[in-house]
Image (cartoon, rainbow, N blue to C red):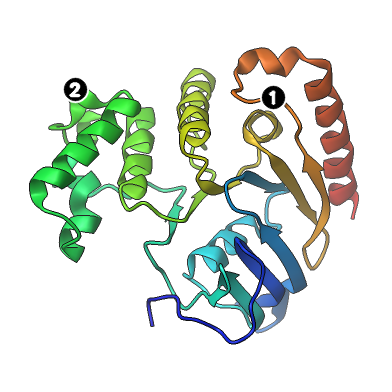
Amino acid sequence: MSEDTPVSKPAKDGIHLDRVSKGFTAPDGTHMSVFDNLSMTFEPNQLHVVMGTSGCGKSTLGYLLAGFTTPDNGNVTLDSRPVRGPSPERLLVFQETALWPWMTVLENVIFGPKVRGEANIQTLRKTANDLLAKFGLAEFSDKYPDQLSGGMKRRAEIAQALINRPKVMILDEPFRGLDVMTREILQEYYLALFEETRQTTVFITSELEEALFLADKIYIMGGHPTEILEVINVDLPRPRNFDVTVSKAYLEHKEKAIDLLFQSEEN
């Protein structure tokens, strides 16, 4: 089942995990519990950042929200409807590239709504070109993925997701592996787009500076099984630019987050 269908018991608005447990069986047959009775809510129209140490289950959380994996126990809901598999309402931008190499950038971006027959080709092309212009790719719409830099591919992939107008964008370390300058440029692109649309976003990262620059809320994950150690409300003003990274409030949030991350390592 690929659509979200109504449930009898309403949950909170936004995307919600209700007492979710999830584990995996290792090659030697032992069971590893990732989450045990985890509950959390990602509220509408906010940019939520999830971070924690490597292996703590951040990507597993993204797959649960997107519907690519299901809980062993508990429920995942979006606006009171259970998540029953992948849906255009909840789109995940993976760490790995998701562009088809035999298609141009424009063809990649319009592929999803085109195969679903959601609009005529002229409308889709205009929408796609508008998105590509926002990401600085207007002159590259007729190029193929292997003609793009890593940062350009990432921008095209985000446009490829956004054209579907999802209720929730889930990004799993989308700027991982890029050089510092390219990473900061892409952070600014995505932040400007979020501040224009206020689209509900769950952004997974291992980079503290990235989390602080982007987030309305930061969820620090850690422990075994993984739990939410603390939620940091990042009350930095919007619209936001890199000048904020030298502010007193930013540095206070950074110090608090570092303490929590060290705590999660020790546990």
Task: Give the Cα separation between the discs numbered 1 and 2.
Answer: 33 Å
Q: Quadrant of residue 125?
A: top left
- Mark 1 vs 2, N-terminal side: 2
Horizontally, residue 127 falls left or right of residue 20, namely left
Q: Amino acid at mark 1?
A: Pro
> Which residue position holds label 2?
139
Q: Foreground: 116 or 264?
A: 116
**Residue at image x 9%, y 44%?**
122
Name the quarter where the N terminus is drawn: bottom left
Quarter that holds the C terminus = bottom right
Picture coordinates of residue 213 (x, y %)?
A: 65, 28
Query: Given the current orientation, which residue lies at the most extreme bottom position?
Result: 8
Q: Quadrant of residue 23?
A: bottom right
Question: Mark 1 highlights which residue?
Answer: 237
Image disc number at residue 267: none
Instruction: Find numbered disc 1 in the image and state the secondary structure of the residue it sits on.
Output: loop
Q: Is residue 90 left or right of residue 54?
A: left
Q: What is the total number of numbered labels drawn onto the structure image?
A: 2
Residue at 78%, 15% (x, y): give it.
247
State the image coordinates of residue 106 (x, y, percent, origin top left). Answer: 18, 40
